Image: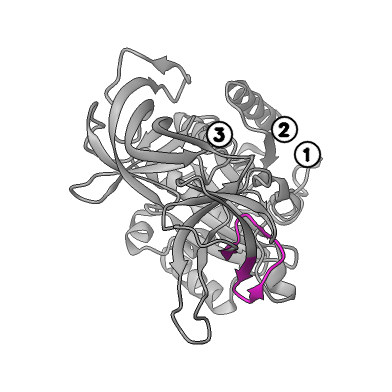
Amino acid sequence: MEHFSGNGYLDMELLRFTTAGSVDDGKSTLIGRLLYDSKSIFEDQYEAIRLSSERRGEPEVNLALLTDGLRAEREQGITIDVAYRYFATPKRKFIIADTPGHIQYTRNMVTGASTANLAIILVDARKGVLEQTKRHAFIASLLGIPHLVICINKMDLMDYDQQVFERIKKEFQGFASKFKVQDIQFIPISALKGDNVVEKSQNMPWYGGSTLMYLLETIHIGSDLNLVDCRFPVQYVVRPQTDEYHDYRGYAGRVDGGIFKPGDKVMVLSSGFTSKIKAIDGPEGPVQEAFAPMSVTIRLEDELDVSRGDMIVRVNNVPEISQDIDMMVCWMNPAKLQLNGKYGIRHTTREARCVVKNILYKVDVNTLHRMQDDKEVGMNDIARISVRTTKPFFFDKYQINRFTGSVILIDEGTNETVGAGMII
């Protein structure tokens, strides 16, 4: 439920979705088709890719060229980085994170998918469910993406055969029954020809469901955010020091959960002091309530010692406070995860250092089995670990709140993000 101030277009709901699949499954073509059929690209853009397709000797306009903006990708015909695309229809605004299919780019998928409401996973109708399909589906469930849409693509190459669709759907459901996703939907499509992307397919009368575009425009995302547990990590203390605002003292940040209103009794962590909310200021002026993921400034009735990294919560609804954190980590660095290794750790606006106390197991992405004998965690591996931090953190389980349940681990020598963690 991300809204922007103003009226009309700006007040529309924003849906963030990510696309994933193996190499050559047609992700770029699908996004190109969505943009083209929903009239979200300009004539000159279309003309440029038409000429480019002609030069390459292709029989049809290659819509994939719309999204493959990086030169190296165009030359190799692959997507290598997370590319964000923005478009809108009269019903909603969209941000697409187009993530690569190659196994060596799993970390990019984690980056692109971490804020998504929905994940589209493409499956090539000729190949069925591959290891990459399973890996992407598992990561999507691990990242707590509430809605999964499995697009079985290239149906035109399989004569739009219903049996092919049903077989792949059954195979995927068998695998997906092992992990928690609240909502999985299947759509047979041809991104190249446009079947069931924006327009209903004439070639698959046996499919009674909605098109991908209709699903994206109408899927209910309002309840995806946690509006129960109030969490406000402080990013910045606002003290203007001007004559006009001489006594102004506000705490700026993003609401990561719950709803805050003036008059609410709140507690500040880590001090444990309590106060009441005097006022909440948004970008346009005072607001009567602030909910996730709004960015606001909260003013309190009492002068408390509050600084960046503290968290404002409700008195009777406090997150877990601990220096010991159990998490699933997706390792993103060629250098392996070290047992007893020291890393920087960042959670909401709080930073500290931590030591890896235990590597409990690694996950085999194909079978979802726990590998307790093999604890060597390298690039793209997913493992369960426990760490101890140098100061207490205030967190929720990732399943309860994706904002306050996620951390990143940082190599202190290079300042690179080496791991993304979901708190269990």
Instruction: For the residues labelled 1 and 2, say whether their Cβ atoms are less than 8 Å apart.
Output: yes
Mark 3 or 2, nearer chain start: 3
Q: Nearer the viewer, mark 1 or mark 3?
A: 3
Q: Which residue is mark 1?
A: 207
Residue 72 is left or right of residue 150, and the answer is left
Q: Please state if 81 lies on the left or on the right of 374 as rendered.
A: right
Give the class, few, some or many, for how many residues have Cα within 10 Å of label 1's Cα (few <14, many ≥20). Answer: some
Decide whether the magenta segment is chiefly helix, strand or loop. strand
* Residue type at the position of mark 2: Gln
Residue 214 vertical placement versus 357 (above, below): below
Residue 341 place in picture, x, y as percent: 22, 32
| Residue type at the position of mark 3 | Ser
Local SS, label 3 = helix
Residue 291, percent from left and from top: 66, 56
Q: Secondary structure at mark 2?
A: helix
In the picture as drawn, the residue positioned furthest to the front comes out as 302
Please report the residue visible at 32 percent of the width from the left and 40 percent of the height from the top. Answer: 332
Q: Which residue is mark 2?
A: 162
Region in magenta: 279-299
- Residue furthest top in the image: 373
The circle drawn on residue 141 is: 3
Of pointers 1 and 2, the one earlier in the residue sequence: 2
- Which residue is nearer to you in this view: 90 or 161? 90
- Report the amino acid beneath label 1: Tyr
